[in-house]
Amino acid sequence: MNFKFINVFYLFTIEVTVMGSWILRWNFDRPNYAPGEVALVSFWFENLGDTPLYISDILLEFDFGVYSLGSTVSGIIQPRRNVYVGSARIQIPSNVVGRRLFTIRYYIYEYINGTWIDLNYYKHGWYFINIYPRPLYRVFISRGIRGEDRIIGDYIVEKVKEWGFETVTVGVEIIVPEEQVPMRVRDEIMRADALIAIATPRFLDALTGLWKTLEWLHGETGIAYGVGKPLLILKDKRVHLGCLPGYLASLRQVLVIEFDPFNLEELGTKLSAIMPQFREWIENRRSQEFFEALAKLAVTGLALLGGLVVLSGIVGSISESSKR
């Protein structure tokens, strides 16, 4: 994930023209945390310019508090070098849950003509990390297990896990003899807190000219609907659902999110926008509140907060130049 915010001001003098530029990267050690846990965040600093830079006083400003990393994460970075500048552990409060926002602030100094020049604070955001109580929710993933389906399905599963879910698919996490598959599928759906179906193309209907999806997706969706499980369908834009899933979508009993198989990153941002509400549906078992919440949220692939783009902060980078 790249976030670019560059202000460029050129300072011209008779003797010299200088301008520092850099990239600050960070990485949290896990995709999600439980309340009260300790998170480890590591930082790398790449100096793109021709003068030494010094970074210090990094602050992670969450909506529930500010963490000063002090001298734990700091250092001098020589020109054209990419350097690990340190890690820090932050204690997550025991009463904090959900998607929590933060910004990053830090000081930069630039070494010019034998003097360290204070470039002052730089601030970037918003980003977020996920904090969910244990145990994680268990979700049954209805999907194809062929190679072409796994490429898409595996990507989606990893994104779902980031939102505090344990995923299970018969044929992937669970392997049983073929004759036991129908009963095991039913048992796993019954054990799950919700079902997410990934509708990928399976065959082209000769009469309608439309792509149809996996036959068992309809049956697995039916089992989950029959016992009142929250449902979410992620549909390849080429696929015509039909049957029960299409009928349930028309009645607002299931949410269908369409995706482009050649632009899965866009689907990832859509999931970031809706998964908090999906978790609340599972917790409260009130589907009406889920759809009312979505009606207020324009699912365009970006979660917006006051006009600012909110980006996942688990892994991130910032490109910046000095503002002198």
Image (cartoon, grey):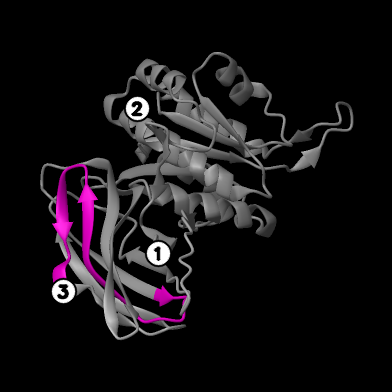
Q: Is residue 194 magenta?
A: no
Determine the residue positioned at 39% across, 60% down: 323
The quadrant the C terminus occupies is bottom left
Magenta residue span: 46-71
Q: Where is 115 relative to 298, above or below?
A: below
User: Is 63 on the left-hand or right-hand side of 316?
Assistant: left
Main SS of the magenta segment? strand
Q: Residue furthest right?
A: 206
Chain-order first, disc 2 or disc 1:
2
Give whichever of 302, 223 is nearer the camera: 302
Determine the residue positioned at 41% across, 25% down: 227
User: Is 252 on the left-hand or right-hand side of 26?
Assistant: right
Q: Which mark is residue 93?
A: none
Determine the residue positioned at 27% across, 25% down: 284
Q: CA distance from mark 3 to mark 1?
A: 22 Å
CB within 8 Å, label 3 to label 2 = no
Tag 1's secondary structure? loop
| Residue annotated with mark 1 | 322
Q: How many residues crowd mark 1 within 10 Å: few (<14), some (14–19), many (20+)?
A: many
Q: CA distance from mark 3 to mark 2?
A: 43 Å
Tag 2's secondary structure? helix
Rendered location of residue 296, percent (x, y): 42, 20
Chain-order first, disc 3 or disc 1:
3
| Residue annotated with mark 3 | 71
Give whichever of 280, 109 is nearer the camera: 109
State the image quarter where residue 31 is shown. Answer: bottom left
